[in-house]
Image (cartoon, grey):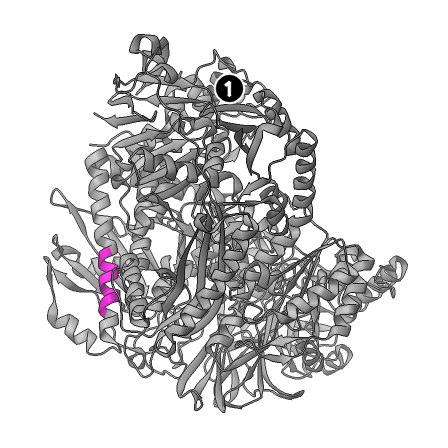
Amino acid sequence: MVETIDPITLEVLTQALISTVREMRATVTRTASSVAIYDAKDFSCGLFGPDSQVVAQSEDIGSHVVPLPWSVRSAMAKLGDTLAPGDVILVNDPYTGGTHLNDVTIIYPVFREGRLIFFPAVRAHWADVGGMVPGSMSGKATEIYQEGIRIPPVKIIERGEMNAAALDLLLANMRVPEERLGDLQASISACRVAEMRIHEICERHGVEKLLEVVRLDLDRAEARMRACISGLPNGTSYYEDYLETFMGGKFEPLLLPLALTIEGDRMIADFTGASPQVPFPVNSTAAVSAASVFIAVKSIFDPKAPLNQGSFRPIEVIAPAGTIVNVQRPAPAGSHGEIRKRVIATMVGALAQVTPDRVAGDLCRTSFHNLLGGYDTRKKREWVHYEWSAGGNGAFAEDDGPSAMATIDWGDLVTVQSSEVMETRMPLIVESSRLAVDSGGAGTTRGGLSMQRAMRVLAPEARYSLLSDGAIVPAFGVLGGLSGFPVGSWIDRDGVIEDFDTPGKVAGHFVEEGATVVVRSAGGGGYGDPLLRAAERVASDVREGYVSANAAVRLYGVVLRADGSVDADATTRLRQRIRDARFTLAAVAAAESDVFEAGAVSRRRICRLNPADAAAGRFQEDELVEFDARLAAPLRAWVRIDRTIGRGTVPLGERALTILKIKAAEPVELRSVASSVRPKVELMEAAE
Amino acid sequence: MAWLGVDVGGTFTDLVLFDRDARELKILKTPSTAQNQSEGILTGIDKLGIAPAKIDRMVHGTTVATNTALERDGARMAVVVTAGHKDVLVVGRGNRMSVYNIKAPPMRPLVLRSQCIEVRERIRVDGTILTPLDEAEVDAIGQRLFDEGVDAVAVCFLHAYANPVHERQCAERLAKWLPHATITTSADVLPEFREYERFSTTALNAYVAPRMRRYLGDLRAKLADAGMTARLAIMTSNGGSLPARRVEDMPVLSMLSGPAGGVIAASFVGKTAKYPDLITCDIGGTSADVCLVRAGEFAMTTEGRVGAFPIKIRQIDINSIGIGGGSIASLATGGFLSVGPRSAGARPGPACYGRGGTEATLTDANVLLGRLGTDKPLGGEIALDRGAAEAAVASLATQLGLTPVAMAEGILRIAAVSLAGAIKEVSVMRGIDPRDFVLFPFGGAGPLHAAEVATELGMQTVVVPPLPGNFSALGLLIADVRRDFVRTRVSQTASTDIADVRAALQDLLHDGEAELADAGFPLDQRRFSASLDMRYLGQSFELSVPVALDATSITDIERAFGEVYAARYGGTNNAVIEIVSYRLAAWGLSEKPTLPTIERAGRSGSAAQTGSREAIFDGKARQTPIFDRNKLPPGYSVQGPALVEEGGSTTVIPPGWSVALDDIGCLVFKRN
């Protein structure tokens, strides 16, 4: 029997489901034991239909909540046939729909009149799930077994009876087991609350009516997403980006290519060609990769749409097994934040070719995990400061990118910690905590600025670690906007700077008392040609300290008088001079194999330059450069000086031409990525 | 002699006068004067027919501070900060205000980055001085700000809560350069740690101060000219009042000046009427405010916001939602129907105001359903046009394929679900069952929607207090003088001496005594209560734990923390406990007005029923009796459907509910 639902009842019951999820959230917050759960809100809740589709979510952290349906689906595939009232499923396995082992999920079937109608589910970050280090996540893990205990979908409660053997086994493998038990109970309590509410709704409105509302909600969310996609032209666009690793001290970028196809009202994101998985915790799962595609689509096209599976339906994701976007046993999956951001970046880059007015420059680049801590022999205690300052967000057509603000996959997470609180808890003095001048990518609208914090150590010794991406390949701009600053960190001893050989990857570096650790998050990409930014806005940026006078001249071509006002005539002349001096080459069609180079693990794109061109454009061997026709996002490559290449030309493959939106023989601009973010020496000035 | 409460809202200025000789309350509504609120107030006093000289107490609820901040219409301001930290106010906490939106706009701080000026100085976490204040730099800043003509300065240094000496030196030195500017220090506004929240509160204070000073100065002058000699008091966000000249210095204390009055009145009337556990639902023109009152005590919070900016001032925990009479019902892509938060406001207002509004609002739905009568002007001022209401609702109904009646009922229903959601946030989401509470509606539109909201939440009883349309103004007459004090001093309980706890509380007590003495309260009218903000080591938020001023032992304090923690989070753990801040609330007790007594003479069921009109419930039109609240005899029971009218408000009793007036004049309705 199909109920007919009037639009009012539809809204009322939809709100009732969302309200149920919010009540689940409140219950977890109230009852969990892990600080990460009740304080940092590192958990999410959802309601799922019997077909494993998510039907209602609330305002959770996207990186967390969006992949949840994959776990529910695997659990159903394994246990669906045997489910009975009173069963509760526990799972954390990344390989079958999870994120990383710390995210432990409870799936709770709700039956009515003998029929399975819903699964409330809670995914929460447990502070520890065993493994090689306290907290379970280690930058040094080479296999998943070092990251904690893996829980495939199991019935932790069976027909109301706790599976004591399984629970014992789990808790015996985790640190602070009584706290873990508290976390488990919190998730179960939240699901029980949902069960109670679902029954109340059914009693008032009838189960058929509720299920029909769910069906309608999924369908209208799907229709809304299909309408968004239908508005885009058919065809395939491409983009590519890199994860950063060092193998034996040598930089090895891991390629993540995307082919994004729009076919009517469908979208297919294909990551075929991604780097093989590596024995470092940078890989991620198919669920995380697919969820990241969805987060990008939602954030670009329809931020306000209600979150349910209907809106996922028109989007297909292809993530080949055994690669960095679909990690397989036994490779580690601990740090899934970096793949998430790379996937979002490739989506932004590809959609920049299709609908540049709806995207923004690349954002923040990385989760930027800094750890500074040690043993304070004076106070006789261990201390660790965990610093994750957000970077600048990308600029977009209407406005400059926000500075130092959590990215779209982070919900409303707080990213700037109070200096006063840090000094209360840690033997540190926060010498400065400022936006880094010039760190936002230049553009018609400017990328958001990085956060730069200088922390002086007051304990006899400390160790500094950093697990970050975006230290070498910075956030890209769109439509001729320039890159933001890469992530940076260094040690400052009264002006004497110590840099790291492996930027972005630092493990337990010794820091003595009195030395200052400086960390700078990534800047956001710019949008549009900086020479088109209104000179008055550049003058205002200089006055406000967002852009230096030097960058105003070099990047924006704006000449200011001594009083800070714009010299209009000089600016017009300078802008023309800069425009004329841009270095362009003619694109020559080439085979894909001629423009990629194999490394130890992955391929990377190369820019083969005639030595005369390299000299004329002042490009160095192995320098990171970008091709740009200012029609979409630029394309990155590493310089290879090559006598076989004709002067004034550069070979580009099919994909590259599509990405740049040009044809063979057309001119393409080549610029140094490092130069657009200024030389190192000047960065140090900014550090003051 | 008489006491006067004046609450200025967006549309109406409400006045409540308590004549102490006749022991009676008089109420009045008059249109607000947006340009200068004081004009509406003087008009109101004039209309009330009271000689200002006869007023010996006047308490005012004002939205000037809030509106100045929200409309970005405040001072030309600068912020002086510790060297290295100029971006505290520019960056905030780095969280995303608009989730899942790649085009989230950048922060718009209250003050330009170039107006955040660094000065060399540094205080350590323990209050000791690391770098002395560079006075030459302060003088250079003073010269610059003088040249720029700023009229407000916020001085915000790190760890000033631990030692305010640098802030004070800096403020004093700047005052020499800027004798006419408002100079506010963070330690004066909020001596509590976490720099962004403290600086934000301080900057807001400085930002609104010059305008508030002008407004209150003008109002006081006008009142004095009219012959009033009483001291003007302003309602503050913590549910108390303070002398106007204190609020001129600390306008940030008055951000909830308007809605606070209603909560105070609710807790007072609730206690008198033996409904100490209640949830307020104050529905006005553009928004609704809900607040949980348990055992007569309203919930407090330090997590307030004005727009995007945190204010850490301790204030009543009022949850606001964008649902009011002017809320617009609209349809988004994909057929998603919503009511609010977009509002027609007072201009053009709902379609039925006949001022050019064409979109369907909550008020239009109420008019179409006959719940709101069109025979008398709204609030005595605005004539309602039924035809315009019907046209607006019908236009939306057509898009959805509904009848206008189903559409109007649907609008009411969705509004009720949203209001219920706001109530869940202050009850269910905190582990409190709203069914153990009565719903306490007021504001012009509260009693119209109460039954439907109660139904959504399974609440059995609705209590409409006397004078619901002027209820916030009544609260102004009830509020005691109150000031909250706080000081951050972080220590672990295990290493804290009880003598230090007592000494810290005594320091606060000293400030409290001074404040109350200044406001003219004799010793026997002063009350104090203390609490500690505590947490487990490693947590980043604190719980407020009540303690005695002469706290007996650390163990008792730890036990009290355990109890509060368990009540909120369902259990405790063995972690190290920290005391973070010390708090003191200081009250100067005021005499209360007596609520109107119910004169039985002239009241009867037949006298009360003034007529009937067609109203629609569950799709069916019914001839519905109309009662005049002021003629209903106590205890006389009326079965729904019924409408109870009075000046400023209409109460809807749907079928399945019955209503009776209790002895003190509350309209109590229960589900049959």
Q: Quadrant of the N terminus of chain B?
A: top right
Q: For the stretch drawn in magenta, what is the main secondary structure?
A: helix
Q: Quadrant of residue B334?
A: top left
Percent coordinates x, y for residue B340 in the rendering: 47, 35
Percent coordinates x, y for residue A466 in the rendering: 49, 80
Q: Nearer the viewer, residue B665 or B525?
A: B525
> At 34% from the left edge and 33% from the top edge, which residue is drawn?
B453
> At 48% from the left edge and 35% from the top edge, which residue is drawn?
B477
The relative height of residue B127 versus residue A344 in the rendered view (above or below) is below
Q: Chain of mark 1?
A: B
The relative height of residue B394 versus residue A644 in the rendered view (above or below) is above
Q: Nearer the viewer, residue A152 or B367?
A: B367
Percent coordinates x, y for residue B547 in the rendering: 35, 61
Count of picture labels: 1
Percent coordinates x, y for residue B580 in the rendering: 43, 68
Residue A531 makes an appearance in the image: no
Q: Nearer the viewer, residue A95 or A315?
A: A95
Q: Nearer the viewer, residue A456 or B102?
A: A456
Q: Quadrant of residue A451?
A: bottom right
* Magenta part of the chain: A181-189
Q: Which residue is mark 1?
A: B378
The amino acid marked with disc number 1 is: Leu
* Element type at mark 1: loop
Classify residue A129 as left or right of residue A406. Answer: left
Q: Is residue A186 magenta?
A: yes
Q: Is residue B374 magenta?
A: no
The relative height of residue B25 versus residue B129 in the rendered view (above or below) is above
Q: Quadrant of the C terminus of chain B?
A: top left
> At 16% from the left edge and 47% from the top edge, which residue is drawn?
A111
> At 51% from the left edge and 76% from the top edge, which residue is drawn?
A423
Residue B188 makes an appearance in the image: yes
